[in-house]
């Protein structure tokens, strides 16, 4: 396609993707309260002051109240939450538009790998996001334990949503590590033996990353992130070892670079021969003019005897 047609197609794809996000965002505005309640309810049940028991107050357990700061803060928070919901819910639509724009320029094996990447990468990201959502109440409990006595915690809702978004993104991207390793192995960049030889450094790096990425200082949040990623890492190593073994068997059956492949030279039947009558009209200029020598005398209908 010419460059102008590519640009027009890109424009159309972007319009469809943005339109889908806007439609879902507008629909999410009507369910704003339900979405916020879904995001905040686990933490409110865990550390909300409205649900604190009398026995907990006697043990000096800290609690927190969610607050809004400023006159326009509720409105901006509503827009932010609705937009994030629209972006997440419309993910299949704008991912398809991106795929439809890139697919014509990919080879068949590249299309196969890209579809496989999306099909596995999206569930892995969602699993990481769920882990972040699941450990957030425990993380909030541990963090509030550092609050001095006779001090009340006020948690601004925008700050809480930003924290939740960061945790979801960090956990989701962390769960993509084994997928990246598998793709590198399929591309021939890393072997399974090389990958498994890194296991000591990989475990240390994953645990250290879990300690830095999680906002809490307790080991629960750190191991909640590091544990599943380590399991997925060893799963990627196992898949890579099996893929290397399969590739080695296939290469062993193929001939060497300087060895000719076996050819089947068995003749096949050609069937019944169809005869074609030659034209009697002269086909060469010299035949039309009557000028012909001994070399041309053997030609009949424009064809010599050899033909």
Image (cartoon, rainbow, N blue to C red):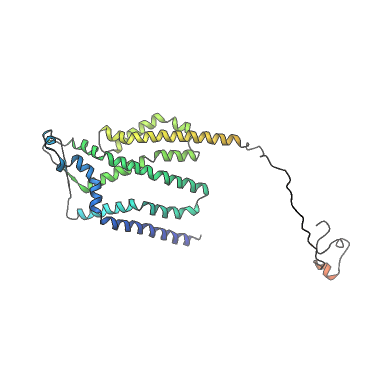
Q: How many marks?
A: 0
- State the quadrant of the C terminus: bottom right
Q: Position of residue 271 (x, y in %)?
A: 74, 52
Q: Position of residue 6 (x, y in %)?
A: 47, 59
Relative side of 15 to 275, left or right: left
| Closest to the observer, 44 or 259 | 44
Q: Position of residue 232 (x, y in %)?
A: 39, 36
Looking at the image, which residue sits at the far right?
294
Q: Position of residue 303 (x, y in %)?
A: 81, 61
Relative side of 106 to 149, left or right: right
- Look at 36% across and 40% down and name the residue there: 174
Relative side of 295 to 138, left or right: right
- Look at 56% across and 34% down and name the residue there: 249
- Look at 44% across and 34% down and name the residue there: 237
- Look at 34% across and 56% down and name the residue there: 21
Q: Quadrant of residue 94?
A: bottom left
């Amino acid at each position: 396609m010419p460059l102008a047609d590519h640009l027009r197609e890109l424009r159309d794809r972007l319009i469809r993707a943005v339109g889908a996000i806007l439609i879902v965002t507008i629909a999410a505005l009507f369910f704003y309260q339900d979405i916020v309640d879904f995001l905040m309810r686990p933490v409110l049940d865990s550390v909300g002051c409205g649900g604190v028991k009398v026995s907990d107050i006697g043990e000096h357990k800290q609690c927190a109240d969610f607050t809004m700061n400023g006159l326009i803060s509720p409105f901006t928070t509503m827009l932010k939450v609705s937009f994030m919901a629209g972006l997440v819910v419309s993910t299949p639509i704008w991912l398809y538009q991106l795929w439809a724009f890139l697919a014509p320029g990919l080879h068949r094996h590249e299309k196969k790998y890209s579809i496989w990447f999306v099909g596995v990468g999206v569930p892995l990201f969602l699993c990481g996001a769920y882990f972040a959502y699941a450990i957030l109440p425990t993380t909030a409990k541990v963090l509030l334990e550092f609050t001095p006595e006779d001090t009340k915690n006020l948690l601004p809702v925008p700050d809480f949503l930003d924290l939740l978004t960061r945790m979801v993104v960090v956990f989701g991207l962390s769960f993509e590590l084994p997928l990246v390793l598998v793709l590198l192995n399929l591309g021939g960049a890393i072997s399974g033996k090389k990958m498994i030889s890194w296991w000591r450094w990989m475990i240390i790096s994953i645990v250290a990353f879990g300690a830095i990425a999680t906002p809490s200082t307790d080991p629960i949040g750190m191991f909640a992130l590091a544990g599943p990623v380590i399991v997925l890492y060893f799963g990627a190593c196992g898949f890579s070892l099996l893929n290397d073994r399969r590739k080695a068997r296939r290469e062993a059956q193929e001939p060497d670079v300087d060895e000719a492949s076996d050819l089947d030279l068995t003749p096949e039947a050609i069937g019944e021969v169809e005869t074609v009558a030659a034209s009697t009209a002269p086909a060469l200029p010299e035949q039309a003019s009557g000028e012909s020598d001994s070399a041309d005398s053997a030609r009949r209908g424009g064809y010599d005897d050899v033909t």
